[in-house]
Image (cartoon, coloured by chain):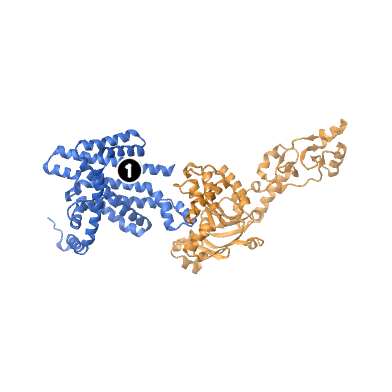
């Protein structure tokens, strides 16, 4: 896991955290200077009454990277993200943003840093109930003294970016949870920050809205390309959104890696336990497990040529496509034989037009109902209907079992 | 019969008297200047209230009540109550009382809101001020008359001063509470966007504390009005003096009339400021 500690070598490093500690309580420095710091959180609490929140955390994030910090409640993830803009002061360590140690900033420098470099989105939104949506979104600019005209124009842009146009004059209380968080995101985007800090932004939303917001965030990130630090307790959310994931436990980072690595080679029992909950059925996609068939049939082929192809590959079916590889249907050996017996000359009479299909992003779980109905393999097609590959029914279950083994054997 | 041991006696009364003597000999100039400023404000306000024609006052109060309570019937009721005060023959005295009350409230706000902010910002200030406020509110109101009398002599100013001391605690308390109850999440968000403590106070905490402060203003006003009768003992004229005279001469009718006028004023002021407070609260919620 060492090699994943650093951000991608290719990318320019935006944020670098080194040996960061946070202990809440009056004896923080004493604990750090003694061997007590290696003790468990409970022992430290019992012996000193202080709370160990973040323990020797180091990581770096590249420009434009979507970095997810995941952990259960009490793992120190919310404390950590607050330390990144000094809403909570660190006990020891360094936080470098573009090479500058922000822990050395004085009050004024810190305010400027918060006003220009970072934007934060909160779990409970943290909106100002006495201000309209527009004024909420413009607040970051108001604080730094931007003229009313300019800040309203820029706030308006951000509001449109998050899809809240025509809600500018409402107060937050008139909005649903999902919409409130859009205001929160717009407020952070208005100041055009380099780094977007998001502390469990979607945890308070109901599952349907949450998924929708996640999709929109992905889309938004494609457009704005910010460096995002995203805190969550939800593994699926982490896997879905993160370029890389850091998993925290008891204030420590126990693993940093790309989602696939976390799933396939969990660093320790803690991560393994997490990952076990993430059934492969929810993580693996159709595109990831599909195979290329040995042969395809083309619409201009005759039935006899087709039957020869099937015999060559020793299969009793094949998918038929047109010149642009768009899927037309499924041809089976039995149908072909009937057509030939009836002296048919065209393949068109031999194929079933609407075979079961799926797109490459579909997760395995969603393939189950299709597989239950299908007699032949499932075709994978892209948005334009182009044939990409096939999935044998048996391989769906093999993939699930294989992954389970990989997880439990280690 | 058991006697309390003499050696445990604390001559607090003597100490306070000595302290007051000391204050008087050294700071009488300061109090004279302060008294003069207060008197000017009070007199001008009184002149203003007596200058406007009675019907204009009645109509203005009616419209204001209708506006803040969203019911024209309430406007009519409030206006009628004010007309009744005039019908009893107490218009002029009522206006004088109103001037004294208003002055006391204005000064209370000028002193109380900053103190409330200080209390909210510093836990130490809260620990010190809170028991003082408790004492101020439980102390019999007559007690304030004595130092007021010593500092400012007889007349309107000591009456104003005594009223101020009696009426200021609620606005201090509720400013403090209003600021402290602003959600931590909201303040954290403001901090995260680089707001300075001053910006947080004026952009976030004060606006969100307004409903609470309005309740404080309402209570302060009510207490100021209640103090009017007591303050008349040291020279505040107005409705309170009428009540006091009625007591001295045992004139039930006169006392009742003047008393009713105070009640009417209280109802009008209470309903209007109360409606303003709820309006603020609703404004925040919707």
Name the chain under label 1: B
Residue plotted at (23% across, 51% down) = B160
Going by the picture, which residue comes out furthest to the bottom?
A33
* Residue B146 in view in this figure: yes
As drawn, the chain in orange is A
* A132 relative position to A356: left or right: left
Callout 1: SS: helix
* B269 relative position to A193: left or right: left
| Residue carrying label 1 | B273
Residue A54 point in image, percent of width and height? 52, 60
Going by the picture, which residue comes out furthest to the top?
A342
Above or below residue A111? Residue B70 is above
Residue plotted at (17% across, 50% down) = B235
Number of marks in picture: 1
* A93 relative position to B163: left or right: right
Q: Nearer the viewer, residue A220 or B71?
A: B71
As drawn, the chain in blue is B
Q: Categorize mark 1 by other alpha carbons within 10 Å: few (<14), some (14-19), many (20+).
A: many
Residue B285 point in image, percent of width and height? 43, 43
On-image quarter of the C terminus of chain B = top left
Residue plotted at (47% across, 54% down) = B190
Quarter of the image holding residue A229? bottom right
* A329 relative position to A344: left or right: left
On-image quarter of the N terminus of chain B = bottom left
Quarter of the image holding residue A195? bottom right
Q: Nearer the viewer, residue A375 or B157?
A: B157
Residue B188 point in image, percent of width and height? 46, 54
* Residue A124 in view in this figure: no
Residue A243 point in image, percent of width and height? 63, 54
């Amino acid at each position: 896991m060492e090699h994943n500690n650093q951000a991608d070598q290719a990318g320019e490093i935006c944020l670098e955290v080194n040996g960061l500690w946070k202990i809440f309580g009056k004896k923080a420095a004493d604990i750090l200077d003694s061997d007590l710091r290696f003790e468990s959180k409970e022992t430290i609490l019992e012996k000193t009454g202080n709370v160990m929140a973040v323990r020797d955390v180091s990581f770096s994030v590249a420009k434009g990277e979507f970095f997810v910090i995941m952990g259960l409640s009490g793992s120190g993830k919310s404390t950590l993200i607050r330390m990144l803009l000094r809403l909570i002061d660190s006990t020891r360590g360094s936080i470098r943003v573009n090479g500058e140690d922000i822990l050395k900033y004085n009050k004024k420098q810190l305010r400027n840093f918060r006003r220009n470099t970072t934007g934060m989105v909160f779990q409970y939104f943290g909106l100002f109930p006495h201000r309209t949506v527009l004024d909420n979104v413009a607040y970051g600019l108001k604080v730094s003294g931007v003229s009313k005209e300019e800040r309203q124009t820029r706030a308006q842009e951000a509001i449109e970016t998050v899809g809240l146009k025509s809600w500018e004059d409402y107060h937050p209380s008139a909005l649903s949870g999902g919409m409130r968080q859009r205001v929160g995101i717009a407020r952070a985007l208005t100041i055009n920050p380099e780094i977007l800090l998001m502390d469990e932004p979607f945890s308070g939303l109901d599952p349907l809205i949450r998924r929708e917001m996640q999709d929109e965030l992905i889309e938004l990130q494609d457009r704005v390309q910010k460096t995002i630090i995203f805190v969550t307790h939800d593994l699926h959310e982490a896997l879905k959104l993160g370029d890389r994931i850091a998993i925290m436990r008891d204030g420590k980072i126990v693993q940093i890696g790309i989602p696939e690595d976390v799933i396939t080679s969990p660093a320790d029992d803690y991560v393994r336990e997490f990952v076990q909950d993430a059934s492969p059925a929810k993580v693996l996609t159709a595109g990831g497990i599909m195979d290329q068939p040995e042969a395809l049939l083309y619409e201009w082929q005759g039935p006899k040529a087709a039957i020869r192809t099937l015999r060559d590959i020793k299969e009793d079916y094949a998918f038929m496509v047109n010149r642009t590889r768009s899927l037309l249907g499924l041809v089976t050996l039995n149908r072909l034989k009937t057509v030939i017996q009836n002296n048919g000359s065209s393949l068109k009479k031999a194929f079933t037009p609407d075979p079961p299909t799926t797109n490459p992003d579909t997760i395995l779980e969603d393939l189950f109902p299709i597989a239950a109905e299908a007699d032949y393999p499932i075709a994978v097609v892209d948005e334009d209907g182009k044939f990409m590959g096939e999935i044998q029914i048996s391989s769906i279950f093999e993939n699930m079992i294989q992954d389970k083994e990989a997880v439990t054997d280690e | 019969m058991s006697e309390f041991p003499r050696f445990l006696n604390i001559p607090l009364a003597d100490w306070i008297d000595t302290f007051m003597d000391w204050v008087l000999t050294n700071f009488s100039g300061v109090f004279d200047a302060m008294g003069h400023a207060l008197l000017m404000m009070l007199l001008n306000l009184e002149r203003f209230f007596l200058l406007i024609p009675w019907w204009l006052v009645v109509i203005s109060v009616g419209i204001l009540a209708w506006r803040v309570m969203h019911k024209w019937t309430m406007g009519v009721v409030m206006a009628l109550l004010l007309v009744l005060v005039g019908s009893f023959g107490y218009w002029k005295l009522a206006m004088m009382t109103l001037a004294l009350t208003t002055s006391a409230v204005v000064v209370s706000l000028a002193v109380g809101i900053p103190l409330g902010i200080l209390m909210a910002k510093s836990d130490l200030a809260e620990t010190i001020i809170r028991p003082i406020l408790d004492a101020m509110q439980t102390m019999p109101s007559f007690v304030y008359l004595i130092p007021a009398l010593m500092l400012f002599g007889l007349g309107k100013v000591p009456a104003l001063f005594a009223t101020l001391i009696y009426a200021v605690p609620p606005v201090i308390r509720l400013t403090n509470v209003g600021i402290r109850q602003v959600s931590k999440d909201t303040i954290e968000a403001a901090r995260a966007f680089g707001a300075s403590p001053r910006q947080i106070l004026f952009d976030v905490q004060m606006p969100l504390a307004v409903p609470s402060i309005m309740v404080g203003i309402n209570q302060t006003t009510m207490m100021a009005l209640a103090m009017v009768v007591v303050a008349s003992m040291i020279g505040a004229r107005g409705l309170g003096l009428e009540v006091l005279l009625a007591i001295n001469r045992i004139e039930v009718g006169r006392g009742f009339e003047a008393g009713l006028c105070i009640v009417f004023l209280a109802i009008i002021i209470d309903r209007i400021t109360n409606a303003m407070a709820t309006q603020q609260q609703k404004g925040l919620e919707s």
